[in-house]
């Protein structure tokens, strides 16, 4: 997984900056448990396309991993909204799973 983020970072350093690059980098960093770095790239991906449900979803996951429950909830709500509008049922289901995880974590942190 580190290889992917390294290659994507190299592309970014070479001046290639777009939605899919930022999304891929943010997703990879989230999976590598680097939520703060992921948040930066996923936020940039959303600047390219504010309706990209998958970017919102992974941003929500990164915020959740970073224990920023308020922003996680906002990002997951945006993901659900845009995925529903576009008929992306798989994304909607994934969002629902993470909304439940968010709720459990919020309850356990009281």
Image (cartoon, grey):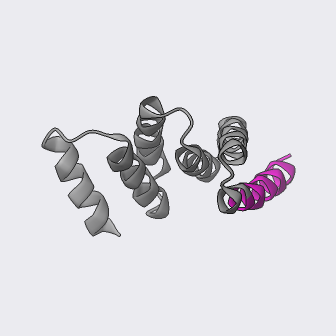
Q: Is residue 39 left or right of residue 103?
A: left
Tell which of 67 and 78 is nearer to you.
Answer: 78
Q: Is residue 2 above or below residue 14?
A: below
Q: Is residue 6 left or right of residue 70?
A: left
* Quarter of the rendering containing residue 96: bottom right
Q: Main secondary structure of the magenta part?
A: helix
Q: Position of residue 43 (x, y in %)?
A: 47, 35
Region in magenta: 93-110
Q: Position of residue 50 (x, y in %)?
A: 53, 32
Q: Position of residue 11 (x, y in %)?
A: 19, 49
Q: Is residue 95 magenta?
A: yes
* Quarter of the rendering containing residue 41: top left
In which quadrant will I find the N terminus?
bottom left
Residue at 32% in and 48% down? 21
Residue at 42% in and 49% down? 23
Q: Is residue 32 above or below residue 57?
A: below
Residue at 49% in and 50% down? 35
Residue at 41% in and 32% down? 48
Q: Is residue 25 above or below residue 4?
A: above
Q: Count every numbered label the image shows and give the total.
A: 0
Q: Is residue 71 left or right of residue 1?
A: right
Q: Is residue 81 magenta?
A: no
Direction left: furthest residue: 14
């Amino acid at each position: 997984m580190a290889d992917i983020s390294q290659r994507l970072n190299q592309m970014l350093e070479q001046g290639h900056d777009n939605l899919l690059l930022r999304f891929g980098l943010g997703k990879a960093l989230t999976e590598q448990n680097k939520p703060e770095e992921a948040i930066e790239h996923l936020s940039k991906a959303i600047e390219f396309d504010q309706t990209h449900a998958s970017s919102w979803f992974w941003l929500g996951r990164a915020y959740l991993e970073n224990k920023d429950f308020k922003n996680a909830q906002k990002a997951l709500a945006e993901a659900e909204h845009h995925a529903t509008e576009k008929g992306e049922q798989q994304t909607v289901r994934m969002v629902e799973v993470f909304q439940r995880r968010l709720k459990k974590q919020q309850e356990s942190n009281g």
